[in-house]
Amino acid sequence: MDLFDASHDSGRGIPVARDSSPLPVRMRPQSLEDVVGQDHLLQPGSPLRLLIEADHAPSSVILWGPPGTGKTTLAYLVAGTRSFVELSAVTAGVKDVRAVIEASKRAIATGADPTVLFIDEVHRFTKAQQDALLPAVENRWITLVAATTENPSFSVVGPLLSRSLLLTLHPLDDAAIGALIDRALTDSRGLAGTVDLTPEAREHIVRVAGADARKALTILEAVARAAGEGGTITADITAQTMDAALVAYDKNGDQHYDVISAFIKSVRGSDVDAALHYLARMVVAGEDPRFIARRMVILAAEDIGMADPQALVIAQAAADAVSFIGMPEGRIILSEATVYLAAAPKSNAAYRAIDAAIADVRAGKAGQVPQHLRDASYPGAKDHGHGAGYIYAHKAPHAVAAQRYLPHALADAVYYCPTDRGVEKSVAERLAAIKNILERRENE
């Protein structure tokens, strides 16, 4: 059985939808010609088309793409008339997988094709659970079709990836979503003859669907019900029926990483409006505000740094306040901090400085700590020359002591190169003044 309770014809082929099935199930494509938005996978001679049109057991396949792009549909088409079993990684375990494998091996012994095992959300399987599939995929005891919304490079074990054909599904564009809506309004399996749809309402549904075919048809069914038999779906009915446009965002998947990445890069690029847009997407999707705040603290030090040292104070204060107050009020604090960080002057000089220093240390460029800087507080330290010749900075003119601090092997090393942006410009001027003082003393 699939998620929407459509019945399978003896576990083979496209599931047979009942009249009472949800609209997305009733409108599921029955052939390659009905699939929209994935032309790059379905060209004549393409690997996927060859798998679907083959009359023998095809290779195993991993389908990667956003929700509502046709992964389940393609799994049914790959299966064709072969024995088909669908499992969800959310509820199934190794025991269920092994039962399907054993049943398929018995069928193969009678001359049948291997069972097509469709595992939805395969990224939710643990490494051990995924490893359990390897012998069956390797020996073609089953044909695995696995679907995932997460990058398989991070969520699927390497041996399973190497034994399968990885196919990437594209998000559906507005034209594809619109075509599906139009088909549902004219197809006898859908809403043919029951409702009309204004262009404004159609545009609204397309926009809110967010490239998700399942969501578009679910919304269409809901607003059609609100309009009533023989009614007209207007923009007002659509807006009243829908509480909000749910953001396409998987907190454990690619969207999580892509949106936070876009947020950080927008702040780094000083685009306040773009930063607030991505912040809003995370807030609406229910992202942990503490996660957002932690990334802002890192960003303040990495990308703003000494150009505005106050940025780190603001970011840390925001993190503390969000943890104390929580949501929804925390969104205001995050917004204020976002605006400040995006508008602040930028410098990654401190970030580059510590990485350069670490690189030297890792390369073995350390050297001995100069004798005059060594700890002289313990008994006998002075007998070893520790602290000898040390100049206490506060007793020197301008509190600048002319003495060597770096190990001899790194005497000419320069790690921190301040910019001329924001507060860091004045830091650069102070460092230049200190250098001049030291040079004058060397020449005295």
Image (cartoon, helix red, strand yellow):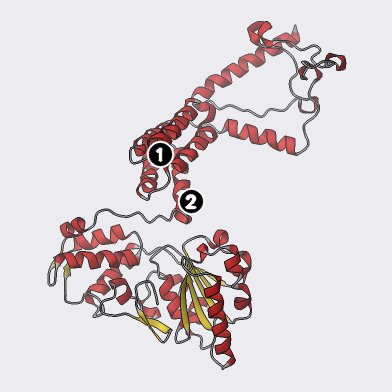
Position of residue 397 in the picture relative to residue 36 (left or right): right
Question: What residue sits 12% from the left and 72% below the top?
Answer: 230
Question: What residue sits 47% from the left and 29% below the top?
Answer: 311
Q: As displayed, is residue 270 above or below residue 254?
A: above
In front of the other: 184 or 289: 289
Q: Which mark is residue 27?
A: none
Label 1, secondary structure: give it.
loop
Residue receiving disc 1 = 271
Q: Position of residue 23 (x, y in %)?
A: 28, 72
Question: What residue sits 17% from the left and 64% below the top?
Answer: 226
In front of the other: 414 or 6: 6
Q: As displayed, is residue 243 above or below residue 45?
A: above
Label 2, secondary structure: give it.
helix
Question: What residue sits 43% from the left and 85% below the top?
Answer: 12
Q: CA distance from mark 2 to mark 1?
A: 19 Å
Q: Is residue 421 visible?
A: no
Position of residue 302 in the picture relative to residue 20 (left or right): right
Picture quadrant of residue 34: bottom left
Picture quadrant of residue 113: bottom right
Picture quadrant of residue 444: top right
Position of residue 106 in the picture relative to residue 334 (left or right): right
Residue receiving disc 2 = 257
Q: Position of residue 202 (x, y in %)?
A: 23, 63
Return the disc, 2 or 1, that comes first in the chain's sequence: 2
Q: Is residue 156 visible?
A: yes
Q: Residue furthest bottom?
A: 110
- What amino acid type is highlighted by mark number 2? Tyr
Q: Residues within 10 Å of mark 2 (few under 14, many from 20)?
A: some
Q: Position of residue 238 (x, y in %)?
A: 20, 59
State yes or no: discs 2 and 1 in contact (Cβ < 8 Å). no
- What amino acid type is highlighted by mark number 1? Asp
